[in-house]
Amino acid sequence: MLELAPLLVSALILGLLGGGHCLGMCGGLMGALTLAIPPEQHGRRLQLLLAYNLGRILSYSLAGLLLGLAGWAIAGSQAEVAMRTLAALLLIAMGLYLAGWWSGLTRIEALGRGLWRHIQPLTRRFMPVSSLPRALILGGLWGWLPCGLVYSTLLWASSQGNALNSALLMLAFGLGTWPVLLATGLAAERITALLRKRGVRMAGGLLVILFGIWTLPGPHQHWLMGH
């Protein structure tokens, strides 16, 4: 578990750095959830937001578990090296996207649109969100929304060669996205403004790019670990 701790922290940071992207993808639904509840019922609004986001990150964990089984099946083979290389390249692409230097990562989202076409109609059955179970289920369904950020992190998590670890890493990633998506009203505007600052985006993007370079299989990993 101690060996997994740095990876869990990394997954959490990836979620935090990608919070601006998550707000763009799910911000509209977040707003709908909060507007459906009168301002004086602040506690009720927070409960629905928590339930929705819990369902969302549980779906990330499930995806990590399922794809992690594939990573476990190819552990120790050349396919694992190829998978880690692809995961590293996607992380670098994600860093370039977060920094605002290249938006090619969004093309990867097309891979999940076929599945989303079948899931999206189901989400309408749970709107408007009037109860905690509805919010939880809606979040679980919305977690499968095509997202290049999630896909790149998912592939990285599944390349660890352990299905349970992959699920835990995706859980940590999902928790990292919570601060932005749980924020409402003025706090959300402030966080969004901060994340849109060029310096913040560039710094976050560079960190993810460096993490992607570290993920690439090669002798540089042993050198970095030794120092």
Image (cartoon, helix red, strand yellow):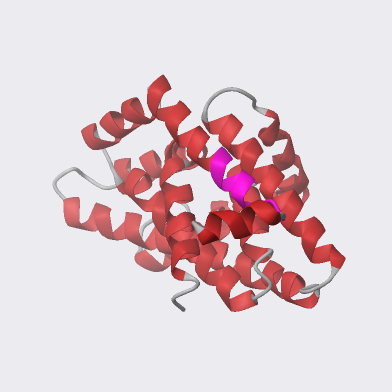
Report the predominant secondary structure element of the magenta stretch: helix
Q: Position of residue 194 (x, y in %)?
A: 32, 28
User: In the picture shown, does residue 53 fall above or below 114?
Assistant: below
- Image quadrant in which you'd find residue 76: bottom right
Q: Position of residue 37 (x, y in %)?
A: 27, 47
Q: Is residue 147 visible?
A: no
Residue located at (26% from left, 30% from top): 190
Magenta span has 211? yes
Indicate left or right for 144 with 79 as reference: left
Q: Residue furthest right?
A: 78
Looking at the rendering, the stretch of residues picked out in magenta corresponds to: 209-217
Residue located at (57% from left, 59% from top): 141
Residue located at (27% from left, 41% from top): 184
Camera-nearest residue between 26 and 170 = 170
Magenta span has 185? no
Q: Position of residue 181 (x, y in %)?
A: 37, 46
